[in-house]
């Protein structure tokens, strides 16, 4: 679900120009947050995505093929682009980070700027409640039961 909703949203940044200039679309270096309908850019800044521009057939969005799309995510505030939903592997890594409860609120805040805040909060809270509190603890409980059964069956063994 995250891949369907937020693929490429990590590239939504406030740009210095409305359209790419000379094949490059430079992001505002002062503003490291993501932009969307929910979070508008400052005056004389435009919200745009290199990923969407590279897929566009509009000639105004023509980008130089040498421009690296990941350049916009190479910032600490964006977790260097590792916490994203751009493809399935990155989504699993992001969900795993949330399930371990390490930095999940930073990821939630990041995507709150990029999408509807209420939906992002519900999505990540459900992820934490279901995956971290329920499934993870259930897995640990099953493993402990199996170890206990193994310990009981080995207690009568002659190898002790």
Image (cartoon, helix red, strand yellow):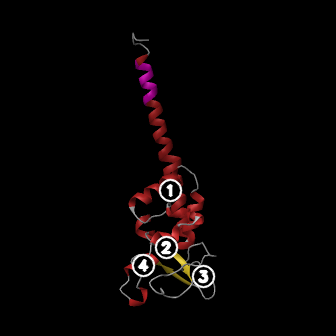
Residue 117 in which image quadrant: bottom right
> What label does residue 11 carry, if any?
2
Instruction: Tell me the element at label 3.
Output: loop
**Apparent side of residue 10 relative to residue 4 in the rendered image (left or right):** right
First-in-chain label (2 vs 4): 2
Q: Position of residue 78 (x, y in %)?
A: 56, 66
Quick one: which residue is furthest to the left in this view? 57
Nearest to the eye among marks 1 and 4: give it.
4
Residue in the foreground of this view, choosing between 96 and 51: 51
First-in-chain label (1 vs 4): 4
Name the residue: 45% across, 28% down: 147
Residue 109 in which image quadrant: bottom right
First-in-chain label (1 vs 3): 3
Q: Which residues are magenta?
A: 146-153
Q: CA distance from mark 2 to mark 3?
A: 14 Å
Q: CA distance from mark 1 to mark 4?
A: 28 Å
Residue 51 vertical placement versus 80 (above, below): below
Find out whether residue 151 is within the magenta segment: yes
First-in-chain label (2 vs 3): 2
Magenta stretch secondary structure, dominant: helix
Residue with the mark numbered 4: 52
- Indicate the quadrant containing the C terminus: top left, top right, bottom left or bottom right: top left
Q: CA distance from mark 1 to mark 3?
A: 30 Å
Q: Residues within 10 Å of mark 3 (few under 14, many from 20)?
A: many
Instruction: Tell me the element at label 2.
Output: helix
> What label does residue 41 carry, if any?
3
Residue with the mark numbered 1: 127
Q: CA distance from mark 2 to mark 4?
A: 9 Å
Q: Residues within 10 Å of mark 4 (few under 14, many from 20)?
A: few
- Indicate the quadrant containing the N terminus: top left, top right, bottom left or bottom right: bottom left
């Amino acid at each position: 679900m995250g891949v369907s909703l937020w693929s490429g949203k990590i590239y939504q940044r406030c740009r210095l120009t409305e359209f790419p200039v000379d094949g490059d679309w430079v992001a505002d270096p002062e503003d490291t947050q993501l932009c969307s309908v929910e979070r508008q850019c400052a005056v004389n800044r435009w919200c745009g995505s290199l990923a969407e521009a590279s897929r566009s057939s509009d000639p105004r969005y023509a980008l130089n093929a040498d421009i690296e799309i990941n350049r916009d995510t190479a910032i600490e505030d964006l977790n260097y682009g590792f916490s994203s939903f751009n493809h399935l592997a990155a989504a699993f890594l992001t969900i795993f980070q949330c399930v371990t409860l390490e930095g999940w609120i930073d990821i939630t805040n990041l995507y709150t700027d990029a999408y509807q805040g209420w939906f992002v909060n519900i999505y990540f809270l459900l992820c934490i409640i279901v995956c971290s509190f329920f499934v993870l603890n259930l897995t640990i409980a099953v493993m402990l039961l199996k170890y206990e059964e193994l310990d009981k069956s080995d207690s009568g063994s002659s190898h002790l």
